[in-house]
Image (tube, rainbow, N blue to C red):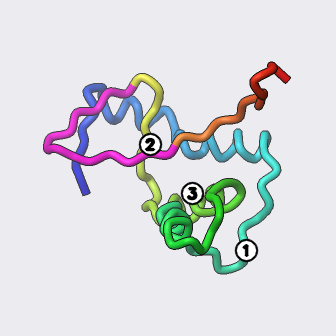
Amino acid sequence: MVSRRPFDSYSKLASQGSQYEDEKHYRSMSSQTPPAPPGWKKTIEDLFDESRAGNRSSVGSPEVDWARDYERSLIPAGTRFTKSGDIYQAIIDVEVSYLTSWSAPCMNDHGV
């Protein structure tokens, strides 16, 4: 695991609460994701591996939501999540992977 250190005071930011808890509350209020099947233990990487192997035609909701929740369940309690405005500096070179997600209207070439 790569160590990262915030430029702001850790204790000050940690006292502001968990971003995950805020996001979990927002998701519970804004989405209709069905519950994960019993025993779900796939990660987002597992879903993409299945897609690359041809065992899955697409990777999307709700499986990505279930995988994200499973991955987060593996994070130790008390872990501090980043907040808007945090600045971090890697003390060694690191590779960063990320997945973006958004909702937007879909239009064809005619604006419909």
Q: Which structural element holds mark 2?
A: loop
C-alpha separation, residue under disc 2 versus residue under disc 1: 27 Å
Q: Of residues 78 and 90, which is closer to you in this image?
A: 90
Q: Of residues 101 and 24, which is closer to you in this image?
A: 101
The residue that mark 2 highlights is 81
Q: How crowded is mark 1: few (under 14 residues within 10 Å), some or many (20 or more)?
A: few
User: Which of label 2 and label 1 is nearer to you?
Assistant: 1
Please identify the quarter of the rendering in which residue 31 is found.
Answer: top right
**Which residue is depicted at the point 66% across and 62% down?**
63
The residue that mark 1 highlights is 37
Q: Which structural element holds mark 3?
A: helix
For residue 111, above or below residue 62: above
**Which residue is depicted at the point 70% across and 54% down?**
61
Please identify the quarter of the rendering in which residue 68 is found.
Answer: bottom right
C-alpha separation, residue under disc 3 versus residue under disc 2: 14 Å
For residue 21, above or below residue 109: below
The residue that mark 3 highlights is 68
The disc, 3 or 1, on the residue closer to the chain's N-terminal end is 1
